[in-house]
Amino acid sequence: MRFKIACAATMALLVFPSGVWAGTITGKVKVDGPTPKRKVIDMSKEPACAKEYSPTDPPRMESTITGPNNALVDVVVYISAGANDEGVMPSQVVTIDQKGCRYIRHITAIHTNQKIKITNSDPAIHNVHPLAEANREWNQSQTPGAAPLDAKFAEAEFIPVKCNIHPWMHGYIAVLKTNHYSVTDGSGGFSLKDLPPGKYTVTAWHETLGTQTQQVIIGGANETKTISFTFKGKAY
């Protein structure tokens, strides 16, 4: 009898929509201490891009961006263990645009083997160069109005991307073995949803300040756990 009840409970979990039993891990990432001043980018050698910015709001480097209350922007927060969704690849295609001689967004997170389209919205030639190590490194030019470049990466890694024509252009593609990820916004906030009860390792990665991890347990359906990460600032 106990076996039958257990089987019935298991089947109930299978037939209900995933969100019914899902928990959430939410929180904020901040920085403690100084961070480098965001330098203004000199785009005078590419007037087509330079004219898109005003003197009062010039383009600035994006490697360390902070917000109100020491919020840290562009941190990739993801489930690095426990999600068991390595083989569940999303069907949607992720787009990375080149606009104003910058990558939109600066940090793009994707699942392994998820399709990417890289577009060029600028009236200037760009050279897309993902500096991959675990995946194949490639380098391809893209003229204004050209068709999107299609790409995907089979191995998990954080890939720097640069333009060989415009040295200030750089970003990252975070290739992950999970669908449970978030890139912090202007408030440093993140949210990891649709997590069934279980034990998870949550990792936070920043391109200049390093990596941190925490263990989090989702104990029941619809439970929300709130955590935070604090990175030590560097004035360099």
Image (cartoon, grey):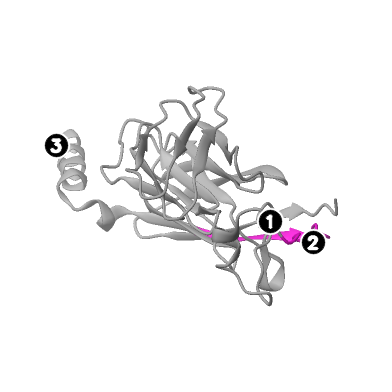
Q: Any mark on residue 147, and which?
A: none
Is there CB contact under 8 Å for labels 3 and 2?
Answer: no
**In front of the other: label 3 or label 2?**
2
Query: Which badge, 1 or 3, is on the more N-terminal residue?
Result: 3
Q: Any mark on residue 4, and which?
A: 3
Mark 1 sits on what residue? 61
Mark 1–mark 3 distance (CA, rounded to whole Å): 61 Å
Mark 3–mark 2 distance (CA, rounded to whole Å): 64 Å
Amino acid of disc 2:
Lys
Amino acid of disc 1:
Met
Compared to 185, does 109 lie above or below?
above
Instruction: Point out the stretch of residues depicted in magenta.
Output: 26-40
Q: In front here: 150 or 107? A: 150
Mark 2 sits on what residue? 37
Is there CB contact under 8 Å for labels 1 and 3?
Answer: no
Q: Residue at coordinates 36% horizontally, 31% vertically from top-left?
A: 113
Query: Which badge, 2 or 1, is on the more N-terminal residue?
Result: 2
Pointer 2: residues within 10 angstroms few (<14), some, or many (20+)? few
Q: Residue at coordinates 30% horizontally, 36% vertically from top-left?
A: 88
Pinpoint residue 201: horizontal percent, then vertical percent: 54, 41
Mark 2–mark 1 distance (CA, rounded to whole Å): 9 Å
Looking at the image, the residue that sits furthest to the bottom is 56
Is there CB contact under 8 Å for labels 2 and 1?
Answer: no
Pinpoint residue 142: horizontal percent, then vertical percent: 43, 40
Q: Residue at coordinates 17% horizontally, 37% vertically from top-left?
A: 7
Residue 165 colored in magenta in the image: no
Q: In front here: 174 or 144? A: 144
Residue 231 in sight here: yes
Residue 38 colored in magenta in the image: yes
Compared to 138, does 7 lie above or below?
below
Q: Secondary structure at mark 3?
A: helix
